């Protein structure tokens, strides 16, 4: 019988080491170009030509039963990345001018730069750049492979400057953001569930040689059941420091990993590289995202751009809609927002897609989104 309750004192490094003995078998990853330091690496151009369902099945295996991490080489084009980099740099400059520099969860504040809610800020600041960036087919492919449809994208930009210190080892949201005392209140099956509610990702916005401090990982560590109660313990941190893997990246590469994987941003030992990554936290429709995002505001701002881009067959509107609007119908007020003709009411994403298909004027969409929000509120009782 499996344990129902997990206790911090039961976390033992020897048990983690047993889990880490497993190695990635290249035969399990036929679409990967190679396995490097236990990490399957994929050529973006190649996997775009393969059967998407088969590729997704391989991604899901790697993220779950496998090492817990994949790298997509050349996932984003340089022109798209450069345009977004310019906008992110502008946001950071604005923060410095305003004296509102952001800190980090697992690193000392002040030395590096962070932009919270970069998703919404990019959509409002540069909707054309946002639309080109988040139309990326491979981002959608991986997100659906791990989370299914109706996922929610959030993003934070992280810049580790030359000489900047990295992070301490950790697991990520949800349970990774709880103290041991709080995490131990959740039964073991919730510890197992937490890692399938989120997909972590990072897009390299510059070349990242090892000396610049690309993220450190401990492949297979996500499969250690007591990991959410173990990563703060010194012996686990010491093992991570001595045994992690660290993969150099090129601009446009994307890394995706299980949030329960032991990981940490590395220290930047270079003299001139401002290591910028767009950190993607993609949430299941059935979970709660970490950041609040005004998706009505984003949809209204992006709509004229999407109407124009929609005439380009090479541009995937559905991927941008998925990154912009709420794709899940609940929670809502079923007195007002009734599921007529189906089991669930219309979502924000459905509404935005209908507007684009029927070529609504912008003011009609804005009114419809406002009414949609009103229907979801509780009524006077």
Image (cartoon, rainbow, N blue to C red):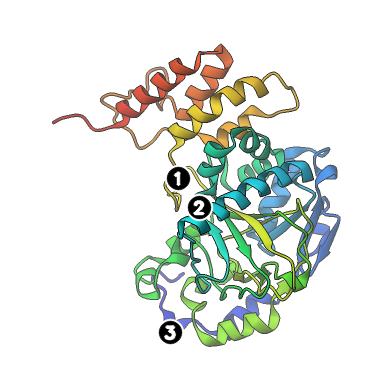
**Cα–Cα gap, marks 2 and 1:** 7 Å
Relative to 102, residue 227 above or below: below
Give the camera-side residue of 76 and 84: 84
Mark 1, Cα crowd under 10 Å, few <14 / some 14-19 / many 20+, is some
Q: Is residue 25 left or right of residue 336?
A: right
Mark 3, Cα crowd under 10 Å, few <14 / some 14-19 / many 20+, is few
Q: Secondary structure at mark 2?
A: loop
Residue positioned 44% across, 49% down in the render: 287
Which sits earlier in the primary sequence, circle 1 or circle 3?
A: 3
Pointer 2 with pointer 3, Cβ within 8 A: no
**Cα–Cα gap, marks 2 and 3:** 26 Å
In what quadrant of the picture does the N terminus appear?
A: bottom left
Q: Is residue 333 left or right of residue 95?
A: left
**Label tally:** 3
Residue positioned 73% across, 41% down in the render: 80
Pointer 2 with pointer 1, Cβ within 8 A: yes
**Cα–Cα gap, marks 1 and 3:** 31 Å
Which residue is tagged 2? 197
- Image coordinates for residue 56, horizontal then vertical, percent: 70, 45
Q: Is residue 337 left or right of residue 107?
A: left
> Is residue 327 visible in the rendered structure shown here?
no
Give the camera-side residue of 103 and 331: 103
Which residue is tagged 1? 286
Q: Is residue 40 left or right of residue 187?
A: right
């Amino acid at each position: 019988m499996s344990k129902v309750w997990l206790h911090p004192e039961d976390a033992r490094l020897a048990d983690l080491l047993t889990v880490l003995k497993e190695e990635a078998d290249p035969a399990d990853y036929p679409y990967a170009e190679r396995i490097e330091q236990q990490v399957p690496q994929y050529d973006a151009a190649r996997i775009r030509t393969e059967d998407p369902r088969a590729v997704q099945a391989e991604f899901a295996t790697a993220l779950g039963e496998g090492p817990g991490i994949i790298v997509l080489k050349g996932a984003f084009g340089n022109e798209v990345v450069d345009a977004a980099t310019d906008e992110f740099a502008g946001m950071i400059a604005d923060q410095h001018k305003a004296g509102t520099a952001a800190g980090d969860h697992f690193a000392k504040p002040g030395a590096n730069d962070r932009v919270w809610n970069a998703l919404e800020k990019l959509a409002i600041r540069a909707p054309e750049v946002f639309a080109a960036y988040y139309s990326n087919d491979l981002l959608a492919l991986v997100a659906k492979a791990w989370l299914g449809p109706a996922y929610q994208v959030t993003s934070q930009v992280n810049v580790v400057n030359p000489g900047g210190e990295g992070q301490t080892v950790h697991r990520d949201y949800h349970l990774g953001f709880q103290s041991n005392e709080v995490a131990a209140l959740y039964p073991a099956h919730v510890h197992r569930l937490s890692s399938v509610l989120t997909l972590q990702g990072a897009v390299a916005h510059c070349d990242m040689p090892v000396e610049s401090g690309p993220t450190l990982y401990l492949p297979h560590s996500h499969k250690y059941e007591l990991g959410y109660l173990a990563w703060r313990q010194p012996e686990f941190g010491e093992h991570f420091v001595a045994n992690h893997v660290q993969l150099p990246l090129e601009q446009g590469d994307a890394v995706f990993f299980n949030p329960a994987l032991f990981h940490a941003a590395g220290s930047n030992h270079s003299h001139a590289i401002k290591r910028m990554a767009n950190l993607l936290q993609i949430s299941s429709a059935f979970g709660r995202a970490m950041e609040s995002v005004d998706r009505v505001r984003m949809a209204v701002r992006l709509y004229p751009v999407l109407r124009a881009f929609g005439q380009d067959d090479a541009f995937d509107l559905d991927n941008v809609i998925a990154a912009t609007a709420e794709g899940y119908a609940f929670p809502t007020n079923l007195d007002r927002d009734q599921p007529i003709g189906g089991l669930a009411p219309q979502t924000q994403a459905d509404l935005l897609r209908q507007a684009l298909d029927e070529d609504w004027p912008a003011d009609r969409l804005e009114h419809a989104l406002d009414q949609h929000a009103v229907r979801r509120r509780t009524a006077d009782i």
